[in-house]
Image (tube, rainbow, N blue to C red):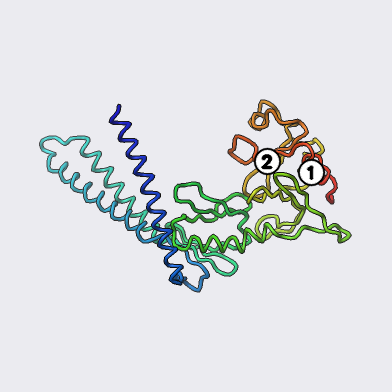
Amino acid sequence: MWVTITSAGIAMVAAFVITRSVTAATKHSDRRRRERGEPLPNEGGALVTVRLRTFQWVLIRVVAILFLVVGALLALGAATTISTGVEPSLVVMAIVLLLAGIGGIVLSRSMRRTRVLAMEDHLLVRQGLHQERRVDLAEIAAVLPIANQYGGLQARDATGKRLFSVMGLARGYAELEAYLQERVVRPRATAQAALRPNGVPIPPWRGIACSADWTTAPLGPGGPLRPVIRLFVGGDVVALHPGEVRALIDGRTGVVESDSQPLAFLASPALVAPTSLGGRQLAGLPPESLALLYDAQDAPAVVLRDSDAVTFRAWVSGLPR
C-alpha cells in the first residue's frame, strides 16, 4: 500500500514540476525574444501566426518511434517462439505498443500541420489533419479560456460551436490573444447602447455585482440586427433576448437562456420548481431576487437582490417593446 501511495505521490510531484518547468521556460524564451525585438515569422502576410512549438510534436514523434521499435522487437520475439508456444501477454503488449506508435506518428503529424493565421478581418485555421478554413471575425461570439495546466483559448460562434482552439504554449499565443481582445472582445463590450425611436439614448443599468445595457446585435453570423440585453459580469458579456427577460420580470417564465456564449441562465427563485436542478441551485434565495447561473456551475454567479432586483426589473419594464 505504501509503495502505491509513494509512487502516486512521486508521479503527481513530477507532473507538477514538469508542467511548471515547461511553462516557465516557454514564457522566459518568449520574453527574451521580445526584449531582443525579434518578430514572429508571419506566414502569407498574416498579422499573427500561431504554431505549436517544435519540441511539442518532435517529443511525441520520438516517443512514438520508440514505441514502434519496442513493439516490433516484441512482435519479432513472439514470432520466433511460435513453435514453443507464444506468451499471450507478449502479443498483447506488442500490439498495444505498435498501435500507440502509429497513433503518436499521426498525432505528431497533425500537430506539425496545425496553425492559425490572423488577417485583418478573418482568420485562416488549420487544425490537425483537417483542411484549412476561413473564420470571419463576425462569426466569433465568444472567446473563452481553456482550463488545463498550460492554459489556452477557444473561440465559439453564436450557437456554441467551437470554431478553433489554441494551446497556451503555442508560439504566437500572446499575440493572438491581444489580436482577439482588440478586434473581437473589446468592440463587443464597448459597443454603443441603442437609441429609443425618438433618438434619446437608453441609459445602462448598474448594480453592485454587474451592469446591463440595451443594444442591437446580429441574429447569428451575418444575420439581421435585433435588440438584446447585455449583462456585464466580470469579463463576460451575457446576451439575453429582451422579450424573454420581460416575460421573466412579468412572472410568465422562470428561466431565460442566453443567446450567446458563455451559456448562462437568468432565473427567478420564485418561479423555478424546487425539485429541479435550478431549484436546488437557487435554494434559500429570496423569491423576489434574480440569479444568473452559468452552465455546469453549482451556485449562482450573480444574485440581484433588494434594490438591485427592484431597479433591474423597473429598467427592463421601461425598455422599448
Type of amino acid at the residue the image marks with label 1: Phe
Q: Which numbered circle lies on residue 215?
A: none
Residue depicted at 49% across the width and 63% down the height: 116
Q: Which residue position is annotated with label 1?
A: 312
Could you tell me which secondary element the residue under label 2 belongs to? strand
Q: Earlier in the sequence, mark 1 or mark 2?
A: 2
Type of amino acid at the residue the image marks with label 2: Val
Quick check: 164 left or right of 107? Answer: right
User: Residue 258: where, in percent of width, then height?
Assistant: 68, 46
| Quarter occupied by residue 79 | top left
Residue at far right of view: 198
**142 and 27: which is toward the camera:** 27
User: Residue 249: where, in percent of width, then height?
Assistant: 80, 39
User: Residue 205: where, in percent of width, then height?
Assistant: 78, 49
Q: Quadrant of the N terminus?
A: top left
User: Residue 314: where, in percent of width, then height?
Assistant: 83, 43
Q: Which residue position is annotated with label 2?
A: 302
